[in-house]
Image (cartoon, helix red, strand yellow):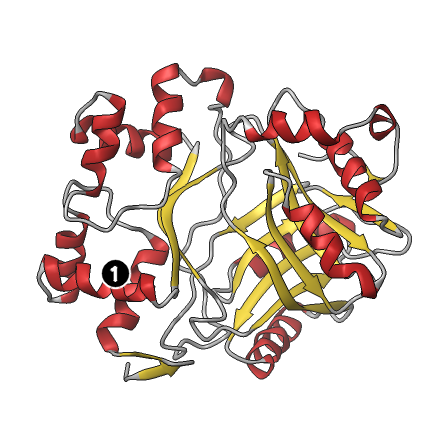
Amino acid sequence: MSTKTVGRVTLDDTDQRLLNLIQTEFPLVTRPFAALGERLGETEDQVLDRYRRLKADRLIRQVSAIFDTRKLGYRSSLIATSVDEDRIDEAAALIDAHPGVSHDYRRDHEFNLWWTIAVPPDMDLETHVNALHRMTGARSTRILPTLKLYKIGVDLDVSDTRSMAAQSVLPAYRETARTAADLTPEEVGYVLELQEDLVPERAPFAAMAERLGTSEDKLIAAAHGLIDEGLMRRYAAVLNHRRAGFGANAMSVWRVPEEQTDDYGYRLAGYAAVSHCYRRPTYPDWPYALFGMIHATSKERVEEAVSDIRDRTGLQEYQLLYSTKEYKKIRVRYFDPAYQAWADAHLRPQDATGGATGGDAH
């Protein structure tokens, strides 16, 4: 690696290595910055200083637990909405005010707003989507739930030296039997703490443990247990894509033979450049069952990945929907009273009967 300038921020070799490391796994140990220092050849305080600077420069959005929404009993879906261009910012603001909306992007397509929403187990997702469809005055809205998840996990190569054909270091998604119905009140407490952004200090888990009335060792052991049981995917950093130099973010959608969807899904998920890969419903006007998010430093690099995918798979029917504006990107918050407050303020009886188009979301 070498020095790299992103906007007004210059990243040296160790900055880049640190950013690459914490995306895949931030150490769940009592002194995580010391553990990172051992990997980087620096002291604990040197790594802390780097982390704080990168956070202040807004390259690091957040370090926290990444939970499996479905395993916690929440229902979620990707939503495609078509609104008048002169009202798109207003519509996005209404959508983003929902506490369960974690991502919202403007894309260069007739469906110009693409967003994700999650609701607690005791709420109906379609009713919430119908309400937002009504509130935004959308022309059309499609509910595109995950029918199968092949991969989830952003792993941006900050140095931008990795081939776009490189294979992923992140494992494929695995199903587990554990569900939110099994969570004890103690485990709910761990979820509430671990979903918060990490405080950059030598022993960042100490304050979490103190608030829960437990020990650091017990909290860290519980976090590893949540990973082992599949409720938490991992504990890691999310970077600000654009500030880290990844200005070309495209949702690739692929038309595939139905009986071979899984085969193509796992092949697409195998690319390091693909961060999220799903099977979703098709419609007469939307024949694309396979979705793969591609993050790159330029459109040319996206095309490099797509070219390799085409060559290796033989798939030719696809679209690339580039994000042209990011309205919202956060992690879903669980066990939050804001969901009920939003429902009380905005849901109407007619929202339960229709508006958006789609099947059961999950």
For image coordinates 36% across by 35% down, the residue present is 227
Q: Nearer the viewer, residue 204 or 32?
A: 204
**Measured from the top left, where is residue 223 in percent x and y?**
30, 33
**Measured from the top left, where is residue 153 in percent x and y?**
47, 53
**Measured from the top left, where is residue 333 in percent x and y?**
49, 36
Quarter location, residue 206: top left
Q: Nearer the viewer, residue 338 or 296?
A: 338
For image coordinates 32% across by 51% down, the residue present is 25
SS of the residue at dot 1?
helix
Quarter location, residue 112: bottom right
Please give left or right for residue 81 compared with residue 181 in the image: right
Residue at the far left in the pictured view: 43
For image coordinates 68% across by 52% down, the residue present is 93
**Measured from the top left, where is residue 285 in percent x and y?**
89, 56
Q: Nearer the viewer, residue 142 or 178?
A: 142
> Compared with residue 63, is residue 2 higher up or lower down, i.e. above or below?
below
Please give left or right for residue 190 compared with residue 153 in the image: left
- Residue beneath label 1, please? 52
> Compared with residue 136, is residue 10 higher up or lower down, i.e. above or below?
below
Q: Is residue 96 visible?
A: yes
Q: Is residue 255 visible?
A: no
Query: Number of numbered discs present?
Result: 1
For image coordinates 54% across by 74% down, the residue present is 247
For badge 1, the amino acid type reads: Arg
Crowdedness of circle 1 by 10 Å Cα count: few (<14), some, many (20+)?
A: some
Q: Nearer the viewer, residue 260 or 7?
A: 7
Q: Locate the N terminus by quadrant.
A: bottom left
Q: Locate the C terminus by quadrant.
A: top right
